[in-house]
Amino acid sequence: MSDKKTRASGPTDDAAFAALAQALTPREPAAEMRLRMRRRILADAARPRTEVLRAAEGEWKPLVPGIVIKTLRRDERAGTQTSLWRIEPGAAVPPHPHTQEEECLVLEGSIIHDGVEYFPGDFLLAPRGERHKAFLAPRGALLLIRSELIPDPAKLAALQTPAH
């Protein structure tokens, strides 16, 4: 309960809570309630906490010519992934559509999109439904991208082929 008029507990409140606690008769929870509580506590204790991928771990995989990616996290259920993209000088990310939002943080180098150059620390957010023009990287770049699941390289290569 969140009541803005509630004040911080003080000595009077502490005394009242102690008196109430002494007045209560302890009750053993029902067996079913104990079982549910135990399952919930054990499930929470078994849940992994922080996942770590060290810089030297993981695999850089070619995506399209001049671009390799290293997947940091893939969430099949949500249909998203987080990855590093290393773009060689002169390479370009082909035009592509978005079925979900895409977040891009420039870590190193620079990229040019639609005539604007972006540098380390610049963040781009593409909304669902947007179709990007090509991203150019004349000096190369390293990007951190959270996006929809990336299709296999053959599908991306097809995006580079002009439609007739």
Image (tube, rainbow, N blue to C red):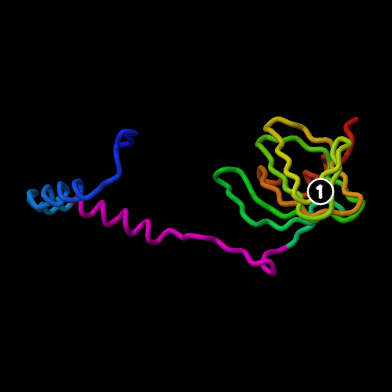
Position of residue 110 in the picture relative to residue 97 (left or right): right
1 or 145: which is nearer to us? 1
Q: Position of residue 139 (x, y in %)?
A: 90, 53
Q: Residue at the front extreme? A: 11
- Disc 1 packing (10 Å; few <14; some 14–19; many ≥20): some
- Residue at horizontal 20 percent and vertical 46 percent from the top: 13
The secondary structure type at the circle numbered 1 is: loop
Whether residue 67 is visible here, answered yes or no, is no
Q: Amino acid at mark 1?
A: Phe
Magenta-drawn stretch contains 66: no
- Residue at horizontal 86 percent and vertical 42 percent from the top: 117
Magenta-drawn stretch contains 36: yes
Q: Position of residue 87 (x, y in %)?
A: 83, 54
- Residue at horizontal 67 percent and vertical 44 percent from the top: 147
Q: Position of residue 98 (x, y in %)?
A: 71, 35
102 or 31: which is nearer to us? 102
The C terminus - image quarter: top right
162 or 9: which is nearer to us? 9
54 or 122: which is nearer to us? 122
Q: Quadrant of residue 7?
A: top left
Q: Is residue 28 above or below residue 100?
A: below
The N terminus - image quarter: top left
Q: Is residue 129 above or below residue 148?
A: above
Q: Which residue is mark 1?
A: 119
- Residue at horizontal 36 percent and vertical 57 percent from the top: 43
The range drawn in magenta is 32-59
Q: Position of residue 20 (x, y in %)?
A: 12, 47
Q: Is residue 26 above or below residue 126?
A: below
Looking at the image, how many numbered discs can be counted on the residues? 1
Q: Is residue 43 above or below residue 8?
A: below
Whether residue 7 is visible here, answered yes or no, is yes
